[in-house]
Amino acid sequence: MPQYTLRQPLDPDSVFLPESPSQTAGPYVHIGLALNVAGLPERDHEIANVMAGTNAEGQRIHLRGLVLDGNDIPVDDVLVETWQADANGRYVTDFSFDNAFNSFGRAAPGMGVDQDGWWSFTTLKPGRLPHPDGPEMAPHINLMIFARGINIHLHTRMVFDDEGEANATCPFLSRVPAERRPTLIAKRVEDSENGEPVYEFVIRLQGRDETVFFDF
Amino acid sequence: MAANEHTAFVMRDRNWHPPAYAPGYKTSVARSPRQALMAIQTPSASEISGPDFQRLTLGPYDNDLLNNYREGTERDGLPVGERIQVYGRVIDQFGKPVPHTLVEMWQANAGGRYRHKKDRYAAPLDPNFGGVGRTVTDEGGWYRFRTVKPGPYPWPNDPNSWRPAHIHISVMGPSISTRLITQLYFEGDPLIPHCPIVNTIKDAEAVETLTSRLDMARSRSFDCLVYRFDIVTRGALQTFFENF
Ligand SMILES: [Fe+3]
């Protein structure tokens, strides 16, 4: 069925301003956004890397990740933010520490036990969710990457290697050139934490097997 | 929100923002993608939705850096430095206020030293200053912080590189599409044009938009000087999907 799309400002009479330009988050981003990594005392509530409590509905998983620079050196001062659907494929937009699951999280190496540039999230395996162009998208986690040397944050999207069928029919993934698609696939590893599955995802900022980054 | 109606955002102007690869800022060389960003023409909920932080419980001094590091401790002193207030409005590209959005900030102390495990600069830590703040904009998109003016500091880029005084600012906006981290500079700072990080931005006018202005009318006698800094996030568009 054909689709008609009209884009217009909410108030057509309004002015038009340039967006504030981005600047690097710098090496001390943790002071502001990951206090314990900087060595600062935490406030009552900090947005962090445990997005799913033990009472969250769905499969709890652990995601371990690494960001590598063009020389294959781990970016150990990175800050990673996530945005992902719950087990039913819905975004929890109302962030709260009372929620069993939050769609938004933040992680950095040195948060908890993660060392040598590794960061981690405790979250849920997301459900599939609709795409305006047709079939449902594969389960995925949207990631934002901030660090010293990154002038404007990078957006990428991770899918799971044990979702082969969903990945094969995903209308989003199908637009990514086939040879670069593997850069978006997290691998389930042998290891488990409390009996819960563990996935690993390596992001390459540059070079051979450079991760696909998106503009939207 | 009706099922056939979504908010989308004005495309990001990648020539106005600094490019990923900016060799004057040496760390960007190995940390910049070489492939083109892949454009998503048909955004889904994954791009146009985002977290709402209205239920995030903030402490009473979270936006008051003059007081928030000693809160609940034995210390009773105030930080050293020029007492300032930084305030402004978060608006979108059509001038519409962005209400109830999370604004976070971090900065060095008046001597240019960060309270971070990795900062080894000779300037001393201030026992009464942490350097972190956060707040949520009000109905009109307004925010404010009380703090001290940060000092400039040296950093390893060129043999003699100094950062102008700056405050790192993070804003969420209504969607992950509007997510932005930037830096606030101070009007009249002679280090601004010398800074390799400022100079990753190609357009001098864009740098002007990151320069806060002294607001004498709101400055308070025997209390603090006030700087105004407005933040512009991507413009919200109404997008209608209609099947016919
Ligand atoms: Fe800084």
Image (tube, coloured by chain):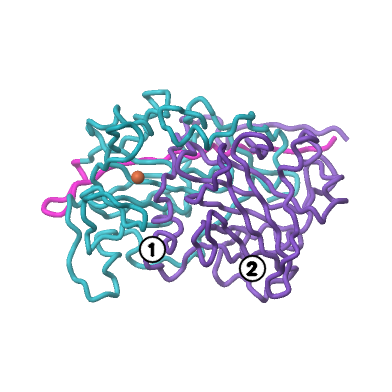
Front position in the image: B117 or A40: B117
Q: Where, by quadrant of the figure, is residue A49 drawn?
A: bottom right
**Screen quadrant of the C terminus of chain B:** top right
Whether residue A200 sits left or right of residue A163 in the image: it is left
Residue B147 in the image: above or below residue B233: below
Start and end of the magenta stretch? B216-244
Spot occupied by residue A142 in the image (x, y as percentages of width and height): 65, 49
- Look at 78% across and 41% down and name the residue there: A173
Q: Where, by quadrant of the figure, is residue B129 drawn?
A: bottom left
- Spatial distance from mark 1 to mark 2, Cα to Cα? 25 Å
Q: Which chain is purple?
A: A
Q: Which chain is cyan?
A: B
Spot occupied by residue A95 in the image (x, y as percentages of width and height): 57, 62
Residue B188 in the image: above or below residue A51: above
Spot occupied by residue B195 in the image (x, y as percentages of width and height): 32, 31
Say what amino acid the circle numbered 1 marks. Gly
